Amino acid sequence: MSSIEKTFCNTNIRHLRLLFLVDHNIESKLLIGIMLNNYQLWGGRYNPIIPVYNGQLNIYYTNLLPLFDPDMVYYSKEIGLERVKEICSPLNPRKLIELDENGRNNLQGVYSHHLIANAQRQALRLFRPFSLVYFNQHEEYLQTSFYNLSFGIGNEYIEDAEHISEIKKTVLDATDIAQTNLHIAKERPFFNCLLSQLEADFTLLRPTNDWELSCLELIIYDEQNATDDLVYFWNRALSQKPSAEILQLIASKKQLELLITDPNFGHLLHSLTYGKAIYLQSFTLSHVHFQECLSKLNATYPSLIFLTHSMLSCPRISNGEFYPYRRLVKKKKNVLLGKKEFLNTPAPAFTINRTIQTGHYVYDVEFFQELENKINYIKFPKGTPPFFILGVADSRVNKLHHTSFFLNPEISGVDVEVPTAINIINVRIGQREAYGEIIEAPVRRLRPSDAGLKLASFIKLFDGSIGDCQSLLLERFWVDLILGISTGKNRKTFFFNRTVNTEAAETNEEFTVKMGASNIHNNDGTFSYLDLKTERRLIYLENVQSVRQLLERSDVELNDDKLLMFIEKSVEKDFMESIDFDLQTFVNMDALFIGMKVKCHHCGSNEWYPLSDLNHKMSCKGCLQSVVPAVQSHLYYRFNDVIYNNLSSDPVKRAKQFNGNYIVLLTLGYFSLRQGAYESFAWAPSMDILVRSGDHWMATDIDIAMIADGMLIIGEAKASGSDFKAKQFEQLTLMADAIRPDKLIIAYYQGTINQSRIQKLKEHVASYGGTVIVHKVEEASYMFGRFM
């Protein structure tokens, strides 16, 4: 990650997102109670309820579950805590809370009546008078749950007084069906179930047919087996944006039979349909009973249209997305100076004129750094304990890999440690968090290795930019230059033909071009500007066929004389447009030094000296006698030893084989430019580590450690695939078991890797939900010039 002075964070406030895992055999009364409790919460209408069938999710809910991002999960005792943990493995909730067997659940969140002012503004935009409606009895009647669930009409409580003291309200007799139906039809009050939708932040599911979103449904359930219909009714709203309209009604068969006896029920239905059809739906009624209900409705209300549609079924979601859409969420930008900052955490905007007395809400925080031409978000891998990095105790990593702080009205702000890439990676390797519990990884002595220190020094030369490193690492011209690989170690002769016109005839004759060595291969790591030009000409001459093919594709025909002129112009163009610029860039960033070779007439050495050491009289590096640079001396260049140390397997002897760090650098560069990671990438230097293996500790290292778009990726890098022996696979398996990274990577430059070992490792890592990446790095190639 770049060394940047300032870190920023975007913050926004939202409600707690809850998710419920309920046993399929749950009593209808308890399930309805959960739904009514959610009506009392800000955002509660969009808290999903997922049924579990004998400890299993059906395929629909298995695919649906990963779309959600709950802060807390409530579950039925019958499912069992361990099974709940398995089901929730795609999620990262802060807590798992067992539902009360008697239905007395104290759900955490902000009371939905705080949103009444927002509801009034919405009614004003729709040119509707604003009023609320309540029942005056606490007793349960046959029809009560119909009004409770379909409209959220319930009893008025003492705590409501401060919110509705100046609001028009009507208190109805719960036993008087006719009065209730008529009031709903004529007065069109704002229903309490709609309050819990306002200012919601949830996963909006996308059905395969969008026309379904505007359909009014009447769901009829069997009192003895209601779970599927109740859950369908509840989760259907997850496909609908907040609005002031009622789009689902739900009644038991007995309730519907009672409601039909009141003529005003027809007025109620008319007021909700706007002339459209009402679609009947039931998963629990028998076909006979369902048709019986349909016939009664058609006979009783001939002016209404009742339809059934086989396409209106629950498992028909194509995808899901956050709502409000992330680009529309209003965020506050904060600048973080230093290592620790205090973040103000104001209450939600809708509470400006009324203070929240109780309840919890969430403060989402996105950390990022503003680079020269982009933003790099600091993301946290799933399972990272934010407390060890940020110092905020009640927090979690959310689905977007940012952090969520849990607040209450008593908290006016939080002290936050500014996160760094190395800290996040080290913390995540050392421990992970699951459902609020810290799991210590069986690892010790995590520290940068010698190779890691070299790697960090290399990237620092490029101001921390992995992408900028790629311009050097993938350009064969520079890589060969660093390793001392020359196109011509000895004098070379190239053969060409030319056409000669004489008085007698036109003949072809052969001619040659002789080129001396460029001295790039001399193994002392120094080179002159003339060496570069000679090397560039040699490259063109060695690739002359590629140049010919390029010209042919452009419909250009040149004889060999003109071809040589074209090559010479191309060399000059390459220097003018690319090489000179790169050389100057390398010099500016201290990756390349300028100096001279000074011959000593005492000991015969001809050593290179950087410009900073040159003087008209100086000491010889060998014999320490006085030497004087010759007036005709040429400038010679030399790459920083940091460059050699990371690319060459033996920088002292200028070995032509690649160092493992070269593979690491190419791998980091590749993943930093992938989709998603382009806006969020972090890395840490290679590190030594001890991993527990049975009753002893095994010493190994982590060559690659990075976070790409919030995913922790660690692994091993080798120049040759054949270097991955049984021992390396054993170490990789131990690391995967201990650390549980999102992805385990095997990176190599050439050769092959034992496929059976790879397959065995993939199966092992998949057992905890991870994946294995086998990555062959891209070979350096000529990225500029006429023969690419």
Image (tube, rainbow, N blue to C red):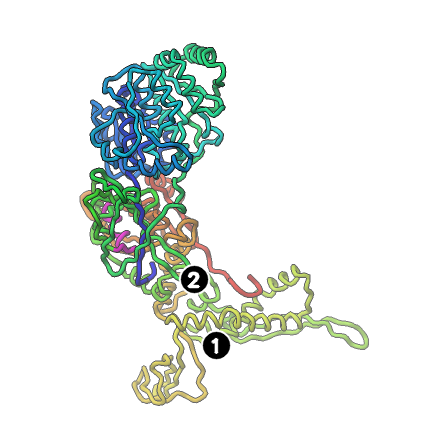
Whichever of callouts 2 and 1 sits on the residue coming sooner in the sequence is 2
> Which range is magenta?
418-435
The amino acid at mark 1 is Tyr
Residue 433 is covered by the magenta coloring = yes
**What residue is shown at x 36% (from left), y 67% (from top)?**
461
Q: Is residue 666 above or below residue 599?
A: above
**Quadrant of the image containing the C terminus:** bottom right
**Residue 556, label in figure:** none
Q: Position of residue 120 (x, y in %)?
A: 35, 36
- Residue nearest the viewer, comparing 101 with 77: 101
Q: Secondary structure at mark 2?
A: helix
540 vs 464, nearest the viewer: 464
> In the displayed structure, would residue 17 be above or below residue 625?
above
Query: Neighbour class for label 1 at 10 Å: few (<14), some, many (≥20)?
Result: some
Density class for disc 2 (Cα within 10 Å; few <14, some 14-19, many ≥20) is many
| In this rendering, position of residue 270 left or right of residue 42 | right
Disc 2 from disc 1: Cα separation: 21 Å
Name the residue carrying label 1. Answer: 529
